[in-house]
Image: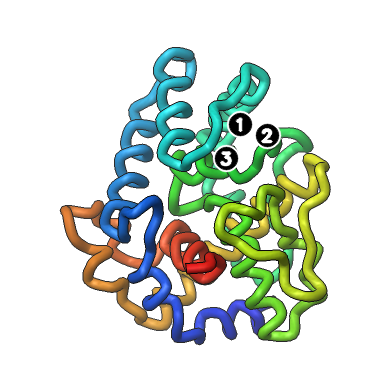
Amino acid sequence: MNNFISLLVGDESWTANLQRYLWEGHGLIAGIRAREKFHAVFEGLSLADDTQTEKWIAEIAAWGGMRPLDAVDRKFAKETLVYLRRLAPAVVQQSDGVWTPERDAPGEIWSNRIAMMSKLYEMADPTRWIIYDSRVARAIQRLLVEHGRQDLAERFRMPAGQGNGANEPPAGMGYLANTPNQKRDGFRNASWLARQVASGLNERGLALPETALLGGVRQDWKKWQAFHVEMALFMSGSNN
């Protein structure tokens, strides 16, 4: 796994893909500011306040162009947010190269509609979790094929709803089955990968594009973070 991460870190396309980020007509600056705004609200949010929490969830759904959550999804999404908030960083950061993502208890991460749920989880902590939708998954699948690591295909299956800007998976790859474990593991594995790549890019000394530093961005976001990697993957996996 270390070798695969090293190959990804050495790829020269990260900066260019991040620089051309575009979502709903909004570019890189707007994308970073949206994440900063949603994360700032979450930091001050009492998850015991259902009204404010559901307002935050609804605003992210609207930003992401997703249909609203039903009552069941809202309930379990809030429970997951409580869990992620208390999850110690030491549990999250796996840097030994062994494929051992977060050891959460079964069911702790609600994974129904994972493309939507993962938007909430990224906004809760953009340095630890990433949006896992069809475009991001397809970009990772392409990298697996390019570097001959199809053996990891089961770890990064593509979420359903692939019609929103992503084509079918590359040969040898596949879609997520409609099972909570596959969805949860795809999200966790992709988040783990993004953290490792971000760390490697920083160690390599690769600077973020100047555009990513505009607008008074928070100090800890002036170097590569997991969400920057997600945004670059999003563009790599799109049809744009």
Residue type at mark 1: give it: Thr
Q: Is residue 179 above or below residue 133?
A: above
* Badge 2 vs badge 1, beta-carbon distance below 8 Å: yes
Task: Classify 10 Å Cα crowding around label 2: few (below 14), some (14-19), many (20 and above).
Answer: many
Q: Position of residue 194 (x, y in %)?
A: 54, 63
Determine the CA span between mark 3 and mark 2. Answer: 11 Å
Of residue 37 and residue 178, the one placed in the foreground of this image is 178
Asked if residue 216 lies left or right of residue 69, the reply is left
Instruction: Count the labels in the image.
Output: 3
Q: Which residue does the numbered mark 1 point to in the structure image?
A: 80
- Kindly report the distance in space between the C-alpha atoms of the residues bearing marks 2 and 1: 6 Å
In percent of the image, x 48 and y 40: which residue is there? Answer: 65
Cα separation, mark 3 vs mark 1, equals 13 Å
Residue 218 locus on image (x, y percent):
25, 52
Q: Which residue matches tag 2?
A: 110
Q: Secondary structure at mark 3?
A: helix
Q: Amino acid at mark 2?
A: Trp
- Which marked residue is nearer to the observer: mark 3 or mark 1? 3
Q: Quadrant of residue 96?
A: bottom right
Residue occupying image coordinates x 35% and y 81%: 205
SS at mark 1 in the image: helix
Front position in the image: 31 or 62: 62
24 vs 99, left or right, is: left
Q: Amino acid at mark 3?
A: Met
Question: Does label 3 or label 2 sit earlier along the sequence?
Answer: 2
The earlier-in-sequence mark between 3 and 1 is 1
- Colour setting: rainbow
| Quarter containing the N terminus | bottom right
- Provide the residue designation for mark 3: 116
When the figure is inspected, residue 13 is found, relative to residue 198, above or below; the finding is below
Q: Residues within 10 Å of mark 3 (few under 14, many from 20)?
A: many
Q: Position of residue 39 (x, y in %)?
A: 37, 40
